Amino acid sequence: MTDRPYVIDEMISAKSIAARIEALSQEIHDEFDGTDKLVVVGLLRGSFVFIADLVRELDLPIEVDFLEASSYGDGMESSREVRILKDLRGAIEGRDVLVVEDIVDTGHTLHHVTNLLKSREPARLKTIALLDKPTRREVDMKADWTGFEIPDEFVVGYGIDFAQRNRNLPFIGKVRFI
Ligand code: PRP
């Protein structure tokens, strides 16, 4: 499939993403105002661009940490499992935590990661996803904040890859095979 030629049509512009992040950062600021314990956790690899822009809009004392998860299946998507490839560097017990995800698709990744982190007894655990494809959901999961709800399209850019390519596009694009 990756050998098939394709073009990328812009779906969400860099300007729209920046404006949405500015609005979301206000809501996050209101939620966490007054805390000196916030740890912002990026889920690798897809969230690396989003978290970089988001934290620079947050006028709060924060720490940044990363966790890498990988999901795989046995042919049946509903039985997908999620493996932790890289865990957090720091402990989060008693801390306020904001998990940053690029996209919620089936929901398995965010569901698994939030359950794992909750078991470590943070004071508060919130989630934000730039993109949400609600029609693809297989588990009951919704981020506390969502940037954009999108239809079931093959999206790339702004951290999201197609066969490890196109993560560096400054906008969200839609893959169109030609
Ligand atoms: C993608 C994406 C999310 C996850 C969403 O990660 O970055 O983490 O899938 O899918 P789900 O809701 O169906 O679980 P991927 O495993 O492709 O890794 P990457 O972030 O390194 O690209």
Image: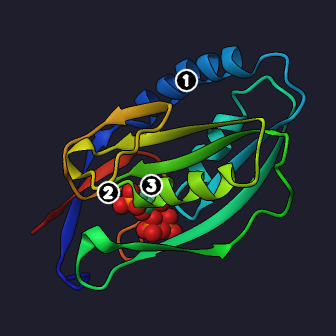
Dot 2 beta carbon under 8 Å from ligand 1: yes
Give the structural element (helix, strand or loop) at label 1. Answer: helix
Residues 115 and 106: in front is 115
Quarter of the image for residue 89 reads bottom right
Mark positioned earlier in the residue sequence (2 or 3): 2
> In the picture provided, is 5 more to the left or to the right than 49?
left
Q: Residues within 10 Å of mark 1 (few under 14, many from 20)?
A: many
Q: x%, y% of residue 110?
A: 49, 53
Q: Mark 2 or mark 1: which is in front? A: 2
* Residue type indicated by callout 1: Leu
Asked which secondary structure carries label 3, the reply is loop
Q: Which residue is mark 2?
A: 106
- Left or right, 104 with respect to 128, comes to left
Reading the image, the residue beneath label 3 is 169
For image coordinates 86% across by 56% down, the residue present is 91
Residue 124, given in percent of the width and then of the height, sits at 71, 34
Q: Find the distance from the CA under tag 2 to the CA under tag 3.
A: 24 Å
Q: Is residue 166 visible?
A: no
Camera-near label (1 vs 3) is 1
Q: Looking at the image, is 150 positioned above or below residue 8?
A: above
Location of residue 148 in the rendering, given as x and y in whole percent from the top left corner: 36, 33
Image quarter (top left, top right, bottom left or bottom right) of the N terminus: bottom left
Amino acid identity at mark 2: Thr
Residue 16 visible in the snapshot: yes
- Image disc number at residue 102: none
Kindly identify which residue carries mark 1.
24
